[in-house]
Image (spheres, rainbow, N blue to C red):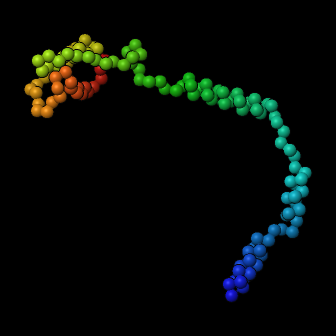
Amino acid sequence: MADDADADLDRHLRDAFEPAPHASARVAEAALAGETRRWRPAWTAATAAAAALCLAAAVALWPSGPATEHGRGVFPSGTLTDGLLVVPLPDGSVAISGGEARPGRPDDGYGIVIVEGELR
């Protein structure tokens, strides 16, 4: 019974996808008489030049790192004396931070400083 169903399915598929009478002959003729691809130096040179131009433009226009003073980052340093943190800023002002020691603070000489805003 299963063989009859498979045979019917096979026959339906063959009928549905039957090629045109001369299609296979046209395909074979075109494949055998087809033109071979030739190396074209002009197209190759133009493609290489376009690729080099795109690469040069990408390198020239690629954004660099953030603009900073004298090409270096600004890293302020300060002193911690008697619980006060004194940090001279690049614009000439001084930031002073202090307060009572909180429980569980780091050992003397260590700490975390959070600075908001721009240092200019």
Can residue 10 be seen here? yes
Residue at screen point 68% across, 84% down: 2
Residue at screen point 26% across, 17% down: 77
Front one among 3 and 60: 3
The image quarter in which residue 41 lies: top right
Residue at screen point 82% across, 36% down: 39
The image quarter in which residue 24 lies: bottom right
Number of labelled discs? 0
Location of the C terminus by quadrant is top left
Residue 46, x across and y down, in percent: 74, 30
Check the image and name the residue furthest to the top.
Answer: 92
Does residue 34 appear to the left or right of 17 in the view shown?
right
Front one among 32 and 111: 111
Above-or-below relation of 2 to 114: below
Residue 112, x across and y down, in percent: 22, 27
Residue 114, x across and y down, in percent: 24, 28
Check the image and name the residue furthest to the front.
Answer: 107
Can residue 12 be seen here? no
Above-or-below relation of 90 to 27: above
Location of the N terminus by quadrant is bottom right
Above-or-below relation of 107 to 17: above
Does residue 85 appear to the left or right of 118 in the view shown?
left
